[in-house]
């Protein structure tokens, strides 16, 4: 935490997350914040601008800023890693590999990856953390030639996408399907929620620029900790199928 | 249902939705389908292509097509109405207006819309149906000047976006946040699910081309009936914030 404005933003973020300042409530005024943090207007305004950019608080427009949401929205972009998204939203990311296996995937996953039902694939189960709290559980399946090098890699160290890109894998396009599912036994244990707890699920099929499938993933988010945001405009219509 | 291929697609879609052909199971072969529907290869192949485009079944590639998902994914695009998305995915859309009211919105909604906390806004509660089944519950808030004409409109007839666009409203950009929430009492009653049932929630802030807020919405989907899909590519990165 190098600068005062970052410290102020982090502290206000913490109060919003904890519900000390609830959704719909006002933040303290700029002068109150200056006094509390022994700060001048500059760092206070910069901290408020950060929270606004995270959509946590309203723009104020001369009024006091109001809390819009207790959960910072993760900006959604293909190939923007969980780690990078966490950093953008002021969290410390973490990860715990639970399992990596070479096996025959479920028939619908084999079909989505366009491999034979008796072909092997590389499957990973990995827990992602935000500020040390379990936030997302990912179940990934890679076609064998792409996935094999992952078995020898240090998957707690960094981004799988970065690793694959370094190895020249052509991650080009992704189709994401969002729905809500009740936590199953494994979700509940690893994400530390009761069974049946509503989870945001993103299923993703990633292909190369020739349309050949590379990866299938089932990511389940505790949406009391992380949400997913998509922004688009009329003119971007062609980018959205 | 005008053509044989549409009839075949609809019938297979029905079996997939009902679970008669489960996720991971194979569809009948082309020859079996030809026999069952007294059809030639052309309509059968066209029906299978339709289901593939909806991502319900795999491409086959010489093998039998396999069921990938029981719920047709709704292609996600800003300003593409629920009605139009339903039609693309082979459903018959419907809607039931529950309430339209002029009132002071909740403080966080007023803040998101950048209006004063004692300004009035127009709020709607509307149930959306797919094939007669409750699929989505929308809670919309419009700033007063934009929303007022809706009070006199026939909101069971058509798309609100079409109506607003006709009146020259400049719907330009939208920010969508996805999470999962347990059904509350109103959700449960209208969507016909138990309280606590996991719902996919999309919160949306729509602005005009000057960035002025127009609409705030909270849409809750029964994701056993409808999911939301986003497709993107590396080159479209700039369109996705």
Image (tube, coloured by chain):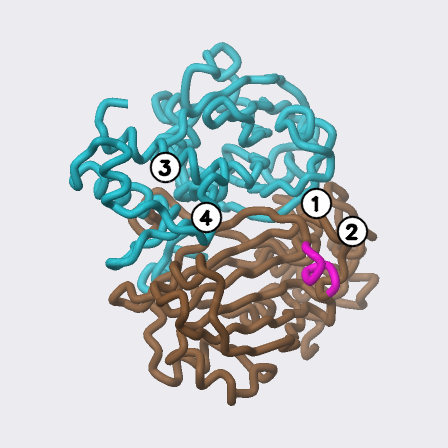
Chain colours: A brown, B cyan
Residues at marks 2 and 1, CA–CA distance in whole angstroms: 9 Å
Residue A151 magenta: no
Q: Which residues are magenta?
A: A184-189
| Residue shown at the point (40%, 72%) measured from the top left | A119
Q: Nearer the viewer, residue A230 or A165?
A: A165
Chain under disc 3: B
Q: Nearer the viewer, residue B176 or B103?
A: B176
Q: Which mark is residue A101?
A: none
Q: Helix, strand or loop at disc 2? A: loop
* CB atoms of marks 2 and 1 within 8 Å: no
Residue A188 magenta: yes
Q: Helix, strand or loop at disc 4? A: loop
| Residue shown at the point (54%, 78%) measured from the top left | A101
* Quarter that holds the N terminus of chain A: bottom right
**Residue A25, percent across and down?**
76, 43
Residues at marks 4 and 3, CA–CA distance in whole angstroms: 13 Å
Label 3: few (<14), some or many (≥20) within 10 Å? Answer: many
Give the mark toward the camera: 1 or 3: 3
Q: Which residue carries the number 4 mark?
A: B69
Chain under disc 2: A
Q: Which mark is residue A66?
A: 1
Residues at marks 1 and 4, CA–CA distance in whole angstroms: 41 Å
**Residue B206, percent across and down?**
48, 38
**Residue A29, percent across and down?**
76, 51
Q: Helix, strand or loop at disc 1? A: loop
Q: Quadrant of residue B118?
A: top right
Q: Which residue carries the number 3 mark?
A: B12
Q: Which residue carries the number 2 mark?
A: A28
Q: Nearer the viewer, residue B142 or B200?
A: B200
Q: Of the two numbered discs 2 and 1 on the same chain, state the one appearing first in sequence.
A: 2
């Amino acid at each position: 935490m190098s600068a005062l404005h970052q410290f102020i933003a982090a502290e206000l973020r913490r109060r919003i997350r904890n519900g000390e300042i609830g959704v719909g409530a006002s933040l303290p005024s700029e002068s109150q914040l200056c006094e509390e943090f022994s700060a001048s207007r500059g760092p206070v305004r910069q901290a408020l601008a950060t929270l606004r950019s995270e959509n946590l608080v309203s723009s104020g427009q001369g009024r006091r800023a109001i809390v819009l949401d207790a959960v910072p929205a993760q900006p959604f972009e293909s190939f923007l890693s969980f780690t990078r998204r966490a950093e953008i939203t002021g969290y410390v990311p973490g990860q715990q590999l639970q399992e990596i296996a070479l096996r025959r995937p479920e028939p619908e996953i084999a079909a989505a990856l366009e491999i034979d039902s008796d072909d092997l694939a590389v499957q990973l189960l990995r827990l992602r953390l935000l500020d040390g709290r379990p936030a997302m559980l990912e179940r990934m399946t890679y076609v064998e030639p792409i996935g094999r090098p992952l078995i020898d890699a240090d998957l707690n160290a960094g981004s799988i996408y970065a690793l694959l890109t370094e190895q020249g894998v052509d991650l080009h396009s992704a189709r994401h399907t969002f729905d809500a599912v009740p936590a199953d036994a494994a979700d509940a244990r690893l994400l530390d929620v009761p069974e049946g707890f509503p989870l945001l699920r993103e299923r993703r099929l990633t292909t190369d620029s020739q349309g050949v499938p590379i990866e299938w993933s089932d990511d389940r988010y505790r949406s009391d900790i992380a949400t997913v945001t998509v922004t688009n405009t009329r003119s971007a219509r062609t980018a959205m199928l």
